[in-house]
Amino acid sequence: MKGIGRIWLLSLMALMLIVSTACSNESGGSNSDNNDEDSVTLTIGSWRTEDSANYQKVIEAFNEKHPDIEVEFKPSKNTEYNTILNTSLQAGEGPDIIHLRPYAPGLELAKAGYVEPIDGLNGLDTFPDETLQASRGEDGKQYGVPLNLSTTQVFYNKAIFKEHGLEEPKTWDEFIAINEKLKSEGVTPLAFGTKEGWLLSLAHGIFGPAHLGGNEFVEKISKGETDFTSPEFVKSIQVMEDLKEYFPNNSEGLGMEDIRTLFFTGQAAMFPLGSWEIEVLREMNPDLELGFFPMPSAVGGEPTLTTWVDGSFGINANSEHKEEAKKFLEFLTTEEFGELFTTNFKMISAIPGVQSDNELVNELSKAVSEYSTPYMMLVYFAGGNPSSKVTIETELQGMYIGEQDVDGVVKTLQENTEAWFEPFQ
């Protein structure tokens, strides 16, 4: 009996070991999903759902050097990203690597203690100081690795321009004449909608500088030497209202995907949007003949191409794998990543000197060096609660549905900004 009991006991222990191993494999975890105890899994949060395939290429390149670090790109819809991220961070959770919104919104997360300082990270010295400032906190600490420079301009369909005998405008009056001709000949001039607020501050960043006077106005208002009640700024809001006659029908109900579709399907001739749309448009319509022009001045100045550092990557202060996350961020500072990014994302890398195999991207890079003006509402007026940037978006939306007028937009924006922007106080 003693022999039989010993065999039964050994069998029971073996069964328990099998069950225990199976349960361990099934339970996994957010930070370690591999059978190999030495490997970890990093997650990346972002608002760029359309870049998932390209980020997979980045991850594959990173894994050639770090095969023991799995990386999962887990984006959220652009309009939902902030809420999802903030909720998870407040709960002590969230992705290991955070795609930080540029300037104040991203730095607010750092100020709240959700982002790990990365001063001393290998490769940070790759970037010019003005580029690093986009993700540097009030405490002087660096919180993000810059990803790319974004620009906003007017894209146009070359085939439609050719069909209607149009050329790129050199003055504001020529730009309006193009809109008039297209409209009179049955073509929607501007693929644009006002359903999503962020599109409105973005569009003001394209059309506004033509009337503001470009960099000179930005320098003055950032120092408090002028404000939003100035005649040139009021004019910039009036122009936003005037351009509505060139938008598609029912533009109040059109969002990003709607206006993109109107453009890449050839239902509209021009598309006032950002450089990140180049690759998206190419994928949607590889035959699209795409051109762009900087916005010509209405006051006799130089054309303008609105430019800014668009996002960076930081580390969740609550991540259990900060050292592994730092290795990924260090990879983002390399020329290898810069070339990979430029080639696949068709955007301008924040790493200086990286050239693209895409002629349009290289032309944009050249135009940046000639006509660059800051995205004023993002770089200088993304503070406040609600922020001045959000305020102008909300007020412009009200204007487009007839619940606000130009003077009301200006008055509300000025009052909002006076509450937090020291140069106005």
Image (cartoon, rainbow, N blue to C red):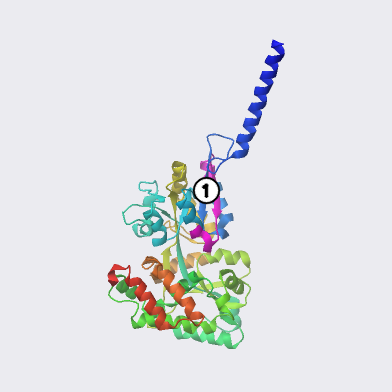
Q: Residue furthest front?
A: 1
Magenta span covers which residues? 62-83
Q: Nearer the viewer, residue 199 or 219?
A: 199
Q: Quadrant of the N terminus?
A: top right
Q: Is residue 288 above or below residue 10?
A: below
Q: Residue at x 50, y 49 (%)?
A: 95
Q: Is residue 68 magenta?
A: yes
Instruction: Identify the image quadrant of residue 35.
Output: top right
Q: Secondary structure at mark 1?
A: strand
Q: Nearer the viewer, residue 344 or 36?
A: 36
**Residue 169 visible:** no
Q: Residues within 10 Å of mark 1 (few under 14, many from 20)?
A: many
Q: Nearer the viewer, residue 219 or 381?
A: 381
Q: Residue at x 35, y 46 (%)?
A: 120
- For disc 1, the marked residue is 43
- Measured as percent of width and height from the top left, residue 413 is found at 38, 75
Q: Is residue 343 above or below residue 18?
A: below
Q: How many marks?
A: 1
- Measured as percent of width and height from the top left, residue 294 is found at 45, 74
